[in-house]
Image (cartoon, rainbow, N blue to C red):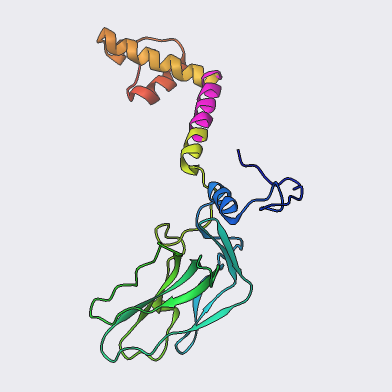
Amino acid sequence: MISYPFISHITTAEPYGDRAIDHKTERTFNKLCWSNGVFMMNADGSELQVIASNNMTLSVLPGGCHIEGTRGYEASKRDITISAAHPSLKRIDRIVIRMDDSDSVRGIEIYKKEGVPSTTPTAPELIRESNYYELALADVYVMPAATEITNNNIVDVRLDRELCGMVVPAFPTPLNLESISNQYVGLLQSAVEGTAAGNLQNSITKLRRDIRTAEISVIDVHINSPSLESELVDFFGSSISV
């Protein structure tokens, strides 16, 4: 079993530390813990949000991300300029964060992927093969002859799990919460059944079942307790002779 971190002893061969790990081991462990996506830490959810800035310029706000076991953090606002609009056709550009594992890059960076002008434009596809793994932050709708990008032209896709998503624990959270919820409901049911209200409910339910089994009318039931009569009237919707 691979285990870490532990103090390494210096060796005379590779690796120089006998408890050292490589990047692949670290990434594998990170993927066991966290999903891909954006770290949502602020109450306003602004991490790596794409917003309009000035004319054809956009801004990507500070924030962090987790991609396939690697992590990236942008400490300051980043500006991106959108290319000139087509005179008569629409276009969809996509702002992405890309993990590039190639030896010349070895990092995560923000990129603009420019779409193709068309009467029915589509956003550029995400690349998730070879050295690349991309997450989409926003789709930018560039209208014909546009000279300005506004927030109305920007579609935030950070919460779309197929395109990006936010970082969450990698275990199946919904299944775990469903199990906890079922246990909680069971405990509440047990508590109610042991109370006076629960006992009264059970008594009324049994009486109703017995009446139906005997095929008699509720008006044939004669009781000497006005308070119990009131409970029965609420259930059966009929007056009962006392």
Q: What stretch is highlighted in magenta?
A: 181-195
- Name the residue: 66% across, 53% down: 14
- As drawn, is 90 to the left or to the right of 184? left
- For residue 120, say whether it is visible: yes
Rendering coords of residue 102 (x, y %): 50, 68
Rendering coords of residue 167 (x, y %): 53, 56
- As drawn, is 131 to the left or to the right of 141? right
Q: Is the magenta stretch mostly helix, strand or loop?
A: helix
Q: Spot the residue most to the top.
A: 214
Is 136 located above or below residue 227 in the figure?
below
Rendering coords of residue 138 (x, y %): 43, 71
- Name the residue: 44% across, 10% down: 224
- Name the residue: 39% across, 66% down: 127
Q: Quadrant of the C terminus?
A: top left
- For residue 241, say whether it is visible: no
Is 199 located above or below residue 30 in the figure?
above
